[in-house]
Amino acid sequence: MRLVLLGPPGAGKGTQAARLAEKFGVATISTGDLLREHVQNGTKLGREARAYMDRGEYVSDRLVVRMVMERLQEPDCRDGFILDGFPRTVPQAQALEDALADAERPLSAVLKFKIGDEMAVKRLANRWTCPNCKRTYNMAFKRPSVEGVCDVCGSRLTRREDDDEVTVRRRLEVYREETQPLEFFFWERGLLREIDAQALEDIVIERTLEEISDIVDIDG
Ligand code: AP5
């Protein structure tokens, strides 16, 4: 299984990636999480990336492509992977396509999660994230059992700095300008599959599993 998850901020890419990873035991690579780790650790890459992320804009293709290519070399990606939030630009998609062609490991499918802007803003305004295990919660849709505490690892939940409404609306604009063209890129290659993500999380995972039922054994 070699999947790309595409969709605007708040579409539920991270949520669905975690559900798929749990079910199929496949590695998940979130470029947002990797970049936030670099920012937190104060690496050179993190220092370069931070200003872009705070404004809701994209980090340079050069930095992101190098980071993902290194991650894909790790042993846990050998049997497949789920890319959450990469590629996001045509040059990134081209670099991924070339690297996977060289390795004779082409993508299985690209899943595009569809959601309206107002729902995205509402979801992100209510998102809380576990900084330790990366699990996400939502004060409107999926509250933790104990207020402010991760159900899984017990860490204190935090808010993402780029989830304020002004930055979310900028992120939605950047998505339309830079990432929407990728839909045609992958459609032309017969890889694009669209999923209506404006539904309960459990319904979205059902739709997702149905979309990939020709790629993996979803009952296995
Ligand atoms: P990143 O962290 O990837 O952010 P994003 O793409 O904007 O996506 P989000 O994580 O906000 O949303 P999601 O779709 O994963 O939704 P989630 O599942 O969390 O990137 C951040 C920044 O890093 C970028 O702005 C950029 O600067 C940089 N970056 C990253 N990748 C890059 C790249 N390739 N190139 C350049 N720069 C890059 O769900 C959201 C909320 O909704 C949660 O609270 C969740 O619980 C809830 N929820 C999920 N599904 C449902 C549902 N079905 N019903 C109700 N609630 C739901």
Image (cartoon, grey):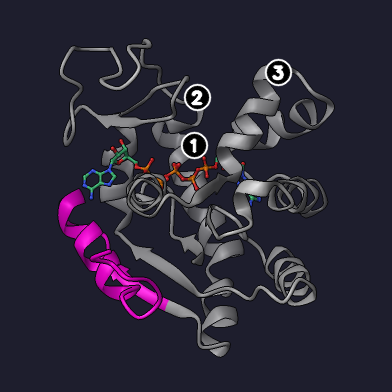
Pointer 2 residue Cβ closer than 8 Å to ligand 1: no
Q: Which mark is residue 41?
A: 3
Closer mark to the observer between disc 3 and disc 1: 3
Location of residue 61 (image quadrant): bottom right
143 over 197 or under it: above or below: above
The answer to whether mark 2 and mark 1 are in CB contact below 8 A is yes
Q: At which x and y percent is residue 172?
A: 46, 52
Quarter-of-image position of residue 97: bottom right
Please state which of residues 9 and 35 is positioned toward the viewer in this rendering.
35
Q: Is residue 46 above or below residue 118?
A: above
Q: Which residue is mark 2?
A: 161
Q: In front: mark 2 or mark 1?
A: 2
Report the residue at 30% width, 22% height from top: 152
Q: Are marks 3 and 1 in contact (CB under 8 Å)?
A: no
Q: Earlier in the sequence, mark 2 or mark 3?
A: 3
User: Mark 2 touching mark 3, by CB under 8 A?
Assistant: no
Position of 39 relative to 168 (above/below): above
Residue type indicated by callout 2:
Glu
Name the residue carrying label 1.
167
